[in-house]
Image (cartoon, rainbow, N blue to C red):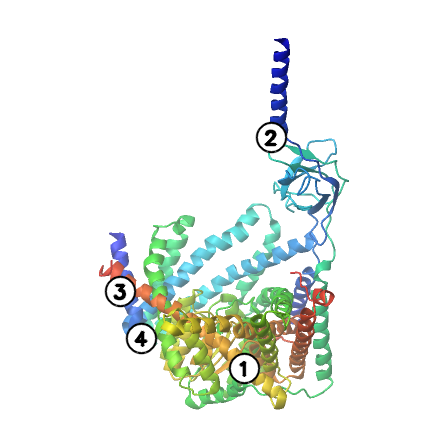
Amino acid sequence: MRKTLPFAIVTGVGFFMLVQYFVPREEFEIIYEWSLDWIIVIGCFAMLLGLWSLTMASIHKVQRKTPGWGYSVIALIGLIFMLIVGLYPGQASLVKGSIFMLFFEYIYIPIQATMFSLLAFYIASAAYRAFRARTILATILLVSALIIMLRLVPLGPLSSVNQWLANFILTVPNMAAKRAFWIGVGLGATATALKIMLGIERTYMGRD
Amino acid sequence: MVETIGIWIAAILTLGIFSFLYKDNPFYKFCESLFVGVSAGYWFATTFWQVMMPKLVDNLAAGRWIYIIGGIFGILMLLRLFPKIGWISRWSLALVVGTTAGLYFTRYLVSNGMVQTENTIMPIFVTGNLPQTIGNLVIVVGTFCGLVYFFFSKEHKGTFGGFAKVGIWFIMVSFGASFGYTVMSRMSLLLGRLDYLFGTWLGLIK
Amino acid sequence: MRKITISLLTIFLLTLFVNISFSQEEPLPPSEVKASDTPNDNGHSITVTWKLSPDDGAGKKNVVAYEILRSDNPEGEFEIRGVAPAGESRFDDKGAKEKTDKNYLPGHKNFYYKVRAKADKTFAESEVSNPAFAYGQWYHTGKTTVLIGVILFSAFALYFINLARKGKKLFVRPLAGIEAVDEAIGRATEMGKPILYIIGLGSADMIATIASFTILSRVAKKTAEYQTPILIPCYDSVVMAVAQETVRAAYLEAGRPDSYKEENIFFVTSMQFAYVAGVNGIMLRERPATNFYLGKFYAESLILAETGSVAGSIQISGTDEIAQIPFFIAATDYTLIGEELYAASAYLGKEPVLLGTLKAQDWGKALVIISLILGALAASFNFQFFLNLFRVQL
């Protein structure tokens, strides 16, 4: 039971989801919708596991006084404060102007936007490193990237040529490569799903 | 007043994150820790009110008792916290993984495999339209070579290797296009933050 | 005087009649109204077809639309169910399946339909249709192409799995990213530094994440053998739970259950850039020798890869998100592109059964290539029958 029941659940539920794709009947549709909702509910309960993990990891760092333990205190304070102001007032905490949303607006949003904007610097450094590689493939990547980047830049007499090239790249070779990629991914993902449903791939389930 | 304080806090935290570009420092570490803690609390509270409550509590209150099954599996998941009976949580994991596998078996096969194949089936010569003929031919040849590149059970040698090489060239052109396409949008994100600092905070840009 | 009055009255009546005729001219009604169950549905829809009114596009040319009416009694009151534009001769009366929904259409209950041809100010109704009831089908005939695809792919997989189980050696070409895994783990062991394994931002119900778990199992087994610590910061709580199970099982299999440390597989946060900030901190403080980025990644991929590069780690990446692969190629040492991520577990484990499914994938690709070539020729010569074989109904 301990070993076989999980795999029986995987196989049974997996094959039901496969079969329901071909059976339009209402009963199958309803069970399909329930299954998706059950997964969401399981994910919600699992949030408590995640919170527990984060809290205990931070507390252990503080207890053991590992280097940088002060920052774990800051993380814990931020976490506990947001939980209190987010849960105690009820649904009203999600209303604009509440303490919860003010912290979201003036702490979370600015830091998130700034982290996102760091990509501008990273993309430049990644491009510099990649295009130094001096292989044919890196050169193709560089030339293609340059043509696309310059399509919005006025280049005088070369503008129309560059824009035509950019349009051609985006609609023809880009489309061809993407199709091959997606077909490969489709077959690979299908094979992975089949391996799981047949119980061939079991590593994710653990063992005793 | 609240807005002014908020803008100052946002601006200081923005500078803290930007300081990372120089090197890792206590100011950045403070911002990072605060960010992790605040985001985890925000995520939990919003998911609780916007997902957990409607999906489980409201459905049970409305008499849709079938949702108790999701609740039971959710509680079984929490048994992971108790080592002796933690193995029971595998039943919940099995439900999640099994549902995913069955769902995505057809989803990926159809939308990625079959629909893409259907869309690539096009005439390789169109009478009276040379540009379309060339375009269609390049797409079909490019897709063919790209698929050959992804073959695992044959060495990339000889004629087969030649096709695979053409395939990876097509793929690199596509990746270069993605790279170039994204650069401008990333630059605009940086401009957005600079506008906040120099405009909204310092008022230097109107 | 009398004659003048009669003449004037006649002219007046004629004018009135002409006005009425031109502004209130009734179209001819549609005919042959038939109702039947909508095929390939969940049993809450009835399809109504009719023959167009002779005044639709011809005759008086005054039909602007058709109203479809329904009743559960041929003599009873009819309610409007929908409108179809002129020229249209079919309407699907789709109802909800929930009884509490005001649009609920019960199955196995007879309904009657009428179709009204509407002109500007007038209309003409058809005869009442035959009774029809809705019922669900057991098989969606429009998905036969998909069923054939499923059967073919499954047949390939089962055939090659069977062949592999009988001991036939299956060749797979080397992949640089996979060959580097052993070297990368060895490097971490020599340097006495941990390995950082990032499963990505996907939830446990994504195939790319599941593929990452299968690779994690093999990597964790090697780290158990070499006694190299492995750190796995997780974005999703369920992913954390599965990762803990996977690594624990790998350590058990390697004969090192006591070396397993659950605190090395931990949750960070489920917000994208906060997760990145947390992982960046780990990279810069722990200085892992090797970073694995395998799973579902989005815009944060470049930040992670660049920070890892600055920290001096050797980096192996793989994702099925096509938009992120160029950044991984630019910033990491080895990249598994798309399908290679799904193939990686077979490469690492070298289990014959898993290699068998790789062969099935290749045969699937071969079938696609044949379809492309034949389809291109059929499209060029306009062989519609062959082209229709490839129509996929979602």
**Same-subunit check for callouts 4 and 1:** yes
How many marks do you count on the picture? 4
Check disc 2 and report the residue beneath it.
C23
- Which type of secondary structure does the marked residue at label 3 adopt? helix
Tell me what residue is drawn at x 72 percent, y 46 percent.
C134
- Which type of secondary structure does the marked residue at label 2 adopt? helix
User: In whole angstroms, how far apart are the C-alphas of marks 3 and 4?
Assistant: 15 Å
Q: Which of marks 1 and 3 is nearer the N terminus?
A: 3
Do tag 3 and tag 4 residues touch (Cβ < 8 Å)? no
Chain ID of residue with mark 2: C
Q: How crowded is mark 3: few (under 14 residues within 10 Å), some or many (20 or more)?
A: some
Tell me what residue is drawn at x 32 percent, y 72 percent.
B29
User: In whole angstroms, how far apart are the C-alphas of marks 3 and 2?
Assistant: 73 Å
C6 and C318: which one is in front?
A: C6
Amino acid, disc 2: Ser
Disc marking residue B21: 4
Horizontal and vertical percent position of residue C216: 53, 78
Q: Quadrant of the N terminus of chain A?
A: bottom right
Check disc 1 and report the residue beneath it.
B168
Amino acid, disc 4: Leu
Q: Nearer the viewer, mark 2 or mark 1?
A: 2
User: In whole angstroms, how far apart are the C-alphas of marks 2 and 4?
Assistant: 76 Å
- Which type of secondary structure does the marked residue at label 1 adopt? helix
Q: How crowded is mark 2: few (under 14 residues within 10 Å), some or many (20 or more)?
A: few
Check disc 3 and report the residue beneath it.
B12
Q: In which quarter of the image is the C terminus of chain A?
A: bottom right
Amino acid, disc 3: Ile
Q: Nearer the viewer, mark 4 or mark 1?
A: 1
Q: Which of marks 1 and 3 is in front?
A: 1
User: In whole angstroms, how far apart are the C-alphas of marks 1 and 3?
Assistant: 46 Å
Specify the farthest residue to the top: C1
Task: From this view, report whether residue C113 is shown above or below residue B170.
Answer: above
